[in-house]
Image (cartoon, coloured by chain):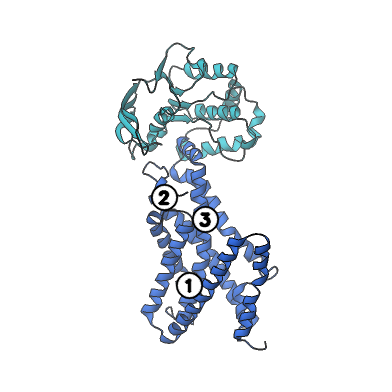
Amino acid sequence: MISYNNICVAFNGPSLFDNLSLHIQKGEKLLITGKSGVGKSTLLKVLPGFVPLNSGTVALDSIVLKQKTLHSIRQKIAYVSQGVELFGDNVESFIKSVFSFKANEHLQYNKEKIKTLFDQFELPQVILQRSIDELSGGEKQRVALVVAVMLERPVFLLDEPTAALDVHLKQKVASYFLENPDWTVIVISHDHQWTKNTGITIIELGEN
Amino acid sequence: MPNNELSFIAMGLCLFLLVLPLSLCYVAGLRSLITDTLFAVVRMVGQLLLVAMLLKYLFTSNNMLLIIAWILTMVIFASSTVVKNCNLNLKYLFMPVLLSFFITLFFLLVYLNVFVLGDYSFFDPRFLIVIGGMLLGNSLRCTIVGLSQFYNDLKNSHKQYLYTLSLGATRIEALAPYFRTSLSSAIRPTVASMASMGIVFIPGMMTGQILGGSNPMLAIQYQVMIMISIFTVGMLSTALGILFSLKISFTPYGILRDCIFNKKD
């Protein structure tokens, strides 16, 4: 379903990846680990076209990432970056603005669903009215995860999504994403809660 | 009005006023500001003298080619000033800014000439150079503020911009908040100056006109015309400058190119 084919990425220096290939099946769960600076986040950013490739290709559902296919590929991916930066005046306006994008017009701003997901990730409802600046790192991460789920996309790219959460929440979030058989999840994390689940493939970058 | 012309002694006494602010700079330890100010004053006097001589020549000669060349020089100089002041790479941003200045200036000059000031011929240097210069000078300020704000905000919150794209936003949807903020920052000083005009301050052009012997009513009419034109040209040149630069400043994948910023930044 997701293919990285002989990709090379370099930023004004030695290559970060040299002919790296990776194939991930639909519904597969993949944990990427590795030392700092080996390119874990870059590997995720390549798929939605946020980092240019020096050579090679990436594809999702056999559609190769190009300028023409960019928007449709991005619409299949829910991406939560490390230290995610939400926008808008408060959480509710942030969520509403996400739903106002043309690409998300087919989705409803569903208050019930928000409530269910907020409960799932242990976020109090009052947070909806809270200013983005007042949220803690963990709250921002969970709001971003709620939005990612609400977008109903089949692929999740999660970059340290549980870094700012306590042990109990780390476990809850990891289980939530790993237990859904329909979702393809690529996660970068140093939290062992992700490895507790069987059925997750672990790849250590920087190791051949 | 006793005498409309200022003598050399009067001009000298006017320049003598600089002693006060420069002494303040000296006491405050702002040595570099003293040098910068003196350099700026010398440049200003020299440039204005040169302009006065050239204008005098242009007003009498009515040489159309020379007038067009003068306008072109102003626009080219303004464009490079904008790009340099925004700390952006001249190689990439010069043409979009130049194009935005050309279009807005041409539109405003034709509009003013045809619909507002019917009694000037388009190539009359008193119209083309004087009004053109004033409009260009003001749109320069707006474009510098707008363009810097747009690209610096984007650079500083690039992560947020990428996140917005990942949430399904098109490039235009993701850039809209940055566009709104930069346009607003660029034009707010003009709006504030329009609102306070006449009460808080008397604008330079009007002061010059009245001191030069014009009827205050006539000076006001021209001032209103100029302010509306400055507002329009400032808004349009900033918006077009940003819009025209988008194609060059982003990769086909919608990612901001690093090369559009000057390396030293």
Crowd class of label 1 (few under 14; some 14 to 19; many from 20; radius 10 Å): some
Pointer 1 with pointer 3, Cβ within 8 A: no
**Residue depth check, mark 3 versus mark 2: number of the one nearer the observer:** 2
Q: Is residue B151 left or right of residue B201?
A: left
Residue B64 place in picture, x, y as percent: 38, 80
Please state which of residues B179 and A95 is positioned toward the viewer in this rendering: B179
Residue named by callout 2: B260
- Cα separation, mark 3 vs mark 2, equals 16 Å
Q: Amino acid at mark 3?
A: Gly
Asked if residue B42 is positioned above or below residue A77 in the image, the reply reads below
Dot 3 or dot 2, earlier in sequence: 3
Determine the image quadrant of residue A21.
top left
Q: Position of residue B237 (x, y in %)?
A: 48, 61
Q: Label 1 is placed on what type of residue? A: Gly
The answer to whether residue A198 is above or below residue B100 is above
**B20 sits to left or right of A59:** right
Amino acid residing under circle 2: Ile
- Which is nearer the eye, A26 or B76? B76
Q: CA distance from mark 1 to mark 3?
A: 21 Å
Instruction: Tell me the residue that label 1 is attached to.
Output: B132
Residue that appears at 58% across and 19% down:
A169
Dot 2, crowdedness within 10 Å: few (<14), some or many (≥20)?
some
Determine the colour of chain A: cyan
Give the residue pinned by disc 3.
B146
Does label 1 or label 2 sit earlier along the sequence? 1
Query: Which tint was used for chain B?
Result: blue
